[in-house]
Image: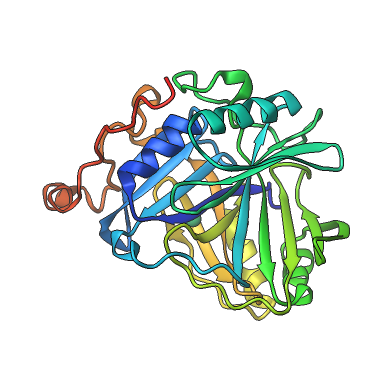
Amino acid sequence: MELGGLHHMTAVTTEASENVAFYTGILGLRLVKKTVNQDDVSAYHLFYGDELGRPGTEITFFDWPQLRIAPNHAGAGEVSTTELRVSGRGAVEWWAGRLEEHGVAHSGIGERGEQAYIEFTDPEGQRLRLADEGEAPRVEAGVPWEGSPVPQEYGIRGLGAVDLTVRELGPTAWVLAEVLGFRLVGEYEEGGERVALFEVGPGGPGSEVRVVERPDAPHAHLGRGGVHHIAFRTADEEEQRSWRERIRGAGLGVTPQIDRFYFRSIYFREPGGVLFEIATDGPGFATDEDARHLGERLSLPPFLEPRREEIESRLTPISPVGSNVGR
Ligand code: ZN
């Protein structure tokens, strides 16, 4: 039993229309599902990804306008950067130009080993990095949507890695390695901080977790522009049940298996404070919508469908403003 890599990351936005404009219009992802938070149906839950929102390509947002005045406080116990994979150094260079064209400040092109990368944030401060996935990536990449304003050769091919910031490396490393089966593939110093690189399943981009140790960091406080959780891939419900037993056996509190309709989920908090999820690869986003029309209307899981009128009336329509950005 092995995890298949990163499944999705879920973050917080407070401006749904602006969020759609940035992730589709500038980053060129496809909005594959527009639904509501199952635990709070007054909030949108937006899913972006490759042409189908394949597992490993998804970035999702809870829209929580009430947090407009509460920016994320960075620190320990959070996903501190989400890395997105592109193919080749040329793509990273192309992105530097695109970000400039759209007035998005960035770090300039950096190098980690042979890999070129560039760091920037979305309009709410969400910390992102685009990185070259290298020549022979082992986790199969997604397929950028052909309707994207970004040429397919430069398109974002999925999640590459996540950086976790914790105060103490040991306990988080223990969960990754001993409970979840990650492999430690590198330890180094970066900017005076100790960093440990882990990978799982096939390894490489799409499977990497970089743990940054900052003993003096304040505790992170989730807000606008912060990450809510990171999810890892499991094949199916059977395997997920086994993961759940294993996590419980390690003495960690874990939720029951929850039906998120597009996949099934279990959640637990690792000792460093980051919320982890293990999500099934299927059934996916084309279960309730035609693949050609993903994300165009509000999707509701069957148990909420009878309340559609009431739910829709309480949501602020996502304005088309900016939907042609970059075309
Ligand atoms: Zn999730």
Quadrant in which the C terminus appears: top left
The location of residue 291, given as percent across then percent down, is: 40, 25
- Residue 190, position as x, y percentages in the image: 82, 59
Residue at the spot x=25%, y=40% of the render?
A: 318
Residue 168: which quarter of the image?
A: bottom right
Relative horizontal placement of residue 105, taking residue 118 as reference (left or right): left
Q: Nearer the viewer, residue 167 or 207?
A: 167
| Residue 21: % across, % down | 38, 36
Q: Whole-percent x and y of residue 54? A: 54, 36
> Residue at horizontal 44%, vertical 47%?
123
Height in image: 274 above or below 210? below
Q: Work out whether 184 lies above or below 275.
A: above
Q: How is the image coloured?
A: rainbow
Q: Is residue 141 above or below residue 225?
A: above
Residue 128 to residue 77: above or below: above
The image quarter containing residue 147 is: top left
Residue 2 seen: no
Q: How many marks?
A: 0
216 or 43, nearer to the observer: 216
Q: Residue at x 55, y 33 (%)?
A: 99
Quick one: quadrant of the N terminus?
Answer: bottom right
Q: Nearer the viewer, residue 222 or 207?
A: 222
The reply to whether residue 138 is visible in this rendering is yes
Image point (29%, 59%), residue name: 65
Tell me: 22 left or right of 131.
left
In this picture, residue 286 sits left or right of residue 278: left
